[in-house]
Image (cartoon, rainbow, N blue to C red):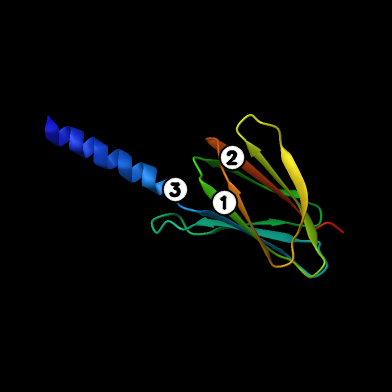
């Protein structure tokens, strides 16, 4: 009976540790600001490779990522000098919080305080 309790405790602690890896979102645009590319990945060594998504000229205006059980999310923006984007977050059932932020070689650290954490990042604003 003791062996089973120890095994379950080890499995649960391993799962909790994996949920604490930092998540990353990288966004960049082309010079004309007509396309936006987003790459999502995390620091865990045993996860799937980075995933890439693109917004074109006729696509929607926002990248969107929904996390479950995230702790820290780092958003790296690599647009041209003088560029801005809208960065929105939502914690669980709370209201969406948006801000227009500088997107020229900047990093924003976000912290999830709820189980469900959502991030929206606009195309570069003109």
Residue, x 20% and y 39% (percent of image)?
7
Q: Nearer the viewer, residue 23 or 39?
A: 23
Q: Earlier in the sequence, mark 2 or mark 1?
A: 1
Q: Position of residue 120 (x, y in %)?
A: 69, 46
Q: CA distance from mark 3 to mark 1?
A: 10 Å
Q: Where does label 3 land, which residue?
A: 20
Left or right: 27 as drawn, with respect to 117: right
Residue, x 77% and y 69% (percent of image)?
80
Q: CA distance from mark 3 to mark 2?
A: 14 Å
The answer, for residue 118, to whether it is visible in the render is yes
- Disc 3 crowd, CA 10 A, few/some/many (<14, 14-19, 20+): some
In which quarter of the view is residue 25 placed?
A: bottom right
Q: Secondary structure at mark 3?
A: loop
Locate the N terminus by quadrant. top left
Locate the C terminus by quadrant. bottom right
Q: Position of residue 108 (x, y in %)?
A: 65, 56
Q: Where does label 2 land, which residue?
A: 117
Left or right: 86 as drawn, with respect to 126: left
- Disc 2 crowd, CA 10 A, few/some/many (<14, 14-19, 20+): many
Image disc number at residue 126: none
In which quarter of the view is residue 6 placed?
A: top left
Circles 2 and 1, Cβ within 8 Å, touching? The answer is yes
Q: Secondary structure at mark 2?
A: strand
Above or below 31: residue 123: above
């Amino acid at each position: 009976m003791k062996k089973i309790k120890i095994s379950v405790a080890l499995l649960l602690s391993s799962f909790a540790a994996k949920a604490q890896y930092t998540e990353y979102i990288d966004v960049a645009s082309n010079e004309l600001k007509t396309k936006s590319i987003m790459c999502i990945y995390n620091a865990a060594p045993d996860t799937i490779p980075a995933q890439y998504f693109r917004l074109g000229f006729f696509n929607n205006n926002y990248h969107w990522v929904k996390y479950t059980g995230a702790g820290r999310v780092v958003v790296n923006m690599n647009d041209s000098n003088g560029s801005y984007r809208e960065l929105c977050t939502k914690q669980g059932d709370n209201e969406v919080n948006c801000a227009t932020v500088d997107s020229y070689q900047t990093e924003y650290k976000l912290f999830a305080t709820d189980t469900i954490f959502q991030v929206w990042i606009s195309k570069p604003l003109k």
